[in-house]
Image: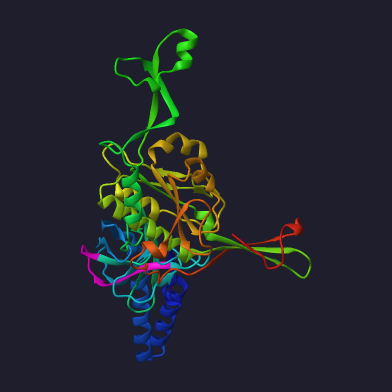
Amino acid sequence: MAGNRNSVFVSLPGIGILFVLAVTAIYFQVYVIAVFLAVLTLLGIVSRLWSGRILKRVEVHVRGTASAGHVGDLLRLEVKVRNKSFLPLIWMDVLLPAGTRPVVRQKGEKEDFRFARNEAEKPQIGLRERLVWLWWQQEISWEEELCALRRGSLEIGGVLLQAGDGFGMSALTSWREFAAPVRLTVYPEIVPVRPQPFLRITQEAVTGGRGQTEDITVLKNSRDYLPGDPMKRINWRLLASSGRMEVNVYETITPGCVTFVLDLESFRNLAVHRNSDGTMQISTFLKERELEEMISLVASCLCAVRERGIPTALLIPGYGSREALFCLPDEEGDLLSAYMNALAMIDYQAEAQTFPYEEFWQISHRLGNLYLCVRTDEGSSLEALAEGLGRSRAHVISWERVQSQMGEYDCYYAEDLLMERPAMENVPEETLVDTRIETGGKDKWKDGETAS
């Protein structure tokens, strides 16, 4: 996209009119006015030549030197601008789009700068740097320091250039698409937590040198009997039917693993009101700040548990067009950066969540102790996971205390785990996501009802 916002004196009709007026002034011997009009004509011609080609000869390169970090860290971009034109750039603004919500902000700035690429586009946040007097074949490079404000992922696909001739007669705008977008990732804020509950349960469950044991409820296969095999593992049914003596081999589980499951849907609310015409207005709200605080708590617990050498796993349900994400420890240990990146990429907008239960049960033996992370202790749409694993392996982490306990499962509250609350200055408490009118099914809802 490129556009010019030029004065009428830069257009061909404008230049022609100025020239005719200058000649007329000379004819009538009004030399002061003639000189003034001649200077305006010359400026119009120079400005038109300048505006027609200057931005076409400008190259911009952007590279992330420190493109990932936690909330509160400094991210860095290296920006290079080169003027390959014979004409100088009097001034030019380099604008990098930074999304519609404040994920990063230029160091030293107190407010976000907003701009729109065209009149039809909604304003978005921009990272702006103004350059003055960029001469022919001159290159300017600098490192842009960005403060990470809140968790999220930002993809910069291009740059918007705005330039002027210094006389106020020509203003240019040009959008440049990058060959490969630059990605900035802000991980959740890490705060001090108390990992003792995870360590105590893990130490009680671990058996053997690698913290593994066998689940006698999951039969993996069978093999021929060898001297020394315990009698209780003999497959008596097969022995009675075929006379072959084989022993059962059960699936190995890892009770020492700590698995966190985010129940995203528990952080949305449905507010229902009856209108005067009898229809029901259903508004969907997202408890945005509480969700961000829970994500920060999960990230902090992952770091604290891993520092003690305990394997961890992270399960994120699917929502909208996104599929569920399972981050599991591998044979060499789990990668914390992969977990942080998965948490940073969460962009939940109060959609209905989905969970692949069949896939979960196939790998449940590797997940050890499961912690279901919910907004309140009133219940969860993912309680089937806890019911299937049983009280010995399933636990709950609740952000808010509403009732004294959550059923038969051990419930840990954020206030008991956190040593310091996350700073969520740039996150709203609640966001209205959607409002719709429903004409049928009025008996399902009560006026003023709020449903999670």
Residue 164: image x %, image y %? Answer: 35, 73
Q: Residue 128 sits in which quadrant?
A: bottom left
Q: Residue furthest right?
A: 277
Q: Is residue 152 visible?
A: no
Q: Residue furthest top?
A: 243
Q: Nearer the viewer, residue 109 or 120?
A: 109
* Extent of the magenta region: 125-143
Q: Nearer the viewer, residue 84 or 402?
A: 402
Q: Is residue 322 above or below residue 42?
A: above
From the image, which quarter does the N terminus lie in?
Answer: bottom left
Q: Is residue 448 visible?
A: yes
Q: Is residue 226 above or below residue 373?
A: above
Residue 401: image x %, image y %? Answer: 49, 64
Residue 249: image x %, image y %? Answer: 38, 23
Q: Is residue 6 above or below residue 182?
A: below
Q: Nearer the viewer, residue 30 or 237?
A: 237
Question: What residue do we see at 35% from left, 55% from top?
Answer: 197
Q: Nearer the viewer, residue 283 or 293?
A: 293
Magenta includes 144? no
Q: Residue 368 sits in which quadrant?
A: top left
Q: Residue furthest front?
A: 231
From the image, which quarter does the C terminus lie in?
Answer: bottom right
Residue 230: image x %, image y %? Answer: 34, 21
Main secondary structure along the magenta-highlighted residues:
strand
Question: What residue do we see at 41% from left, 70% from top?
Answer: 426
Q: Is residue 280 found left or right of 320 in the rendered image?
A: right
The color scheme shown is rainbow
Question: What residue do we see at 47% from left, 73% from top?
Answer: 13
